[in-house]
Image (cartoon, grey):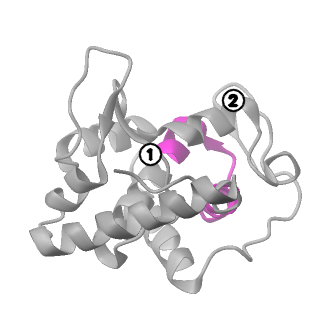
Amino acid sequence: MNFPINGKKATQAIARLIEKSGGPVDYLRIAKLVYLADRASLQSRGIPIVGGHYYSMRKGPTIGEIMDFVGNRNAPGWEDTVSPRFGNEIRLQGRPSFNALSDAEMDVLDATVKAHSSRTTQELVAWCHENCPEYEQTERRRTPIQVETILKAGKKSPRQIQKVIDEAKTFEELDRLLT
């Protein structure tokens, strides 16, 4: 079970990560940072910042929709806020808005950048492989990571996990009804 992606929050979260990283930033680094921020939010608050489908890929855990947004630039506000890829880098283009993000979400994003600022992108990839127990080395293109697995890695109780799963189901149902 996963929470549906929130495209507007995804755009704003990516913009915040680029801004706090001093941009421009390697898109692989951004993919890792947004995954780690969502992971931290799930484990501490019981809800993600951006949601989406989590995957183990050759270069570590990621959110599938974020990779699509980087390539297709189709999240709400993306074209006005985040540049197309220049080689492997993305940067801010225009002044970002953070009105969809709560103060708690901004704090998680900022703390994630700060915690990993001394690592190169490749060191961050290696760190994710070693420190994200939900990550599985994969020979396939990608292997799904379920929210339950992320919460188990965060040492959450079965009761806490069930509460988050119930919340994810509610969000999924609302998303289905609204689209």
Q: Which residues are magenta?
A: 10-31
Q: In front here: 24 or 41?
A: 41
Q: CA distance from mark 2 to mark 1?
A: 16 Å
Place residue 137 in its image quadrant. Answer: top left
Based on the picture, tell me whether residue 136 belongs to the magenta stretch. Answer: no
Q: Which residue is mark 1?
A: 32
Place residue 13 in its image quadrant. Answer: bottom right
Labels 2, 1: front one: 2
The location of residue 60, given as percent across then percent down, is 33, 35
Place residue 37 in its image quadrant. Answer: bottom left
Please tell me whether residue 132 is drawn above or below residue 161 in the rendered image. above
Please tell me whether residue 178 is drawn above or below residue 122 in the rendered image. below
Q: Which residue is mark 2?
A: 71
The location of residue 102, given as percent across then percent down, is 59, 81
Please tell me whether residue 1 is drawn above or below residue 152 in the rendered image. above
- Look at the magenta stretch and give its main secondary structure: helix
Q: Are marks 2 and 1 in contact (CB under 8 Å)?
A: no
Task: Please state if 66 lies on the left or on the right of 62 as rendered.
Answer: right
Sequence-wise, the earlier of marks 2 and 1 is: 1
Residue at x 79%, y 49% (from the top left corner)? 78
Task: Please state if 94 lies on the left or on the right of 65 as rendered.
Answer: right
Residue at x 15%, y 59% (from the top left corner)? 152
Q: In front here: 110 or 62?
A: 62
Task: Please state if 141 lies on the left or on the right of 67 as rendered.
Answer: left
